[in-house]
């Protein structure tokens, strides 16, 4: 199943580690991962820092990907919601760490999140 990134030269260069569009050709399985938050295993406790919540979210995403027989390289789309735009650089560093050069389509939105303790929330799609 070919996964093709589209970054035509007529568009502006993609901002730090994503593709403008990702195409999946042929027969494929699509995994849609709903908004993940940085909860600990009890489902109630959240670390206080952006970095700690982000690490948990990316690890949770890895668990879901593995459950579907996939890994981070299968991600085709990411949507990250930041509670504070000051956390953008830390968010970029997490993405670089876990994606290791893989460039899925991506959007980052700064907004008020449902729970004021949440520093970020991440939705994703993966294909295999």
Image (spheres, rainbow, N blue to C red):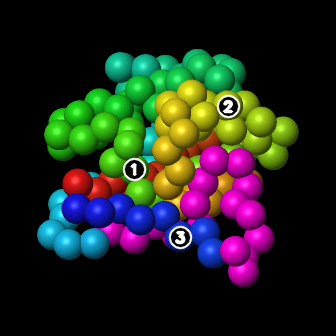
The CA distance from mark 1 to mark 3 is 15 Å
Prevailing SS of the magenta stretch: loop
Residue that appears at 63% across and 75% down: 8
Q: Is residue 14 magenta?
A: yes
In the figure, is residue 18 to the left or right of 72? Answer: right
Residue that badge 1 annotates: 75
Q: Is residue 9 above or below residue 18?
A: below
Q: Is residue 15 above or below residue 38?
A: below
Residue 71 spot, x, y in % from top left: 31, 37
Question: SS at mark 3?
Answer: strand
Magenta stretch contains residue 107: no
Looking at the image, residue 56 sits to the left or right of residue 125; the answer is right
* Residue 79 falls in image quadrant: bottom right
Question: Image point 35% across, 20% down: which residue?
Answer: 41
State the mark number for residue 93.
Answer: 2
Query: Do we see residue 65 in this rendering?
Result: yes
The magenta segment is 9-24
Q: Which residue matches tag 3?
A: 6
Q: Residues within 10 Å of mark 3 (few under 14, many from 20)?
A: some
Determine the residue positioned at 35% across, 62% down: 3
Label located before the other in sequence (2 or 3): 3
């Amino acid at each position: 199943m070919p996964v093709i990134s589209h970054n035509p030269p007529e568009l502006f260069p993609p901002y730090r580690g994503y593709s403008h569009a990702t195409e999946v050709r042929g027969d494929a399985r699509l995994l849609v991962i709903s908004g993940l938050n940085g909860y600990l295993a009890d489902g109630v406790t959240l670390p206080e820092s952006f970095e700690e919540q982000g690490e948990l979210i990316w690890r949770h995403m890895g668990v879901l990907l593995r459950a579907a027989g996939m890994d981070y390289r299968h991600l085709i789309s990411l949507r990250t919601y930041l509670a504070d735009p000051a956390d953008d650089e830390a968010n970029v560093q997490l993405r670089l760490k876990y994606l290791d050069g893989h460039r899925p389509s991506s959007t980052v939105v700064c907004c008020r999140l449902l729970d004021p303790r949440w520093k970020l929330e991440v939705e994703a799609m993966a294909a295999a």
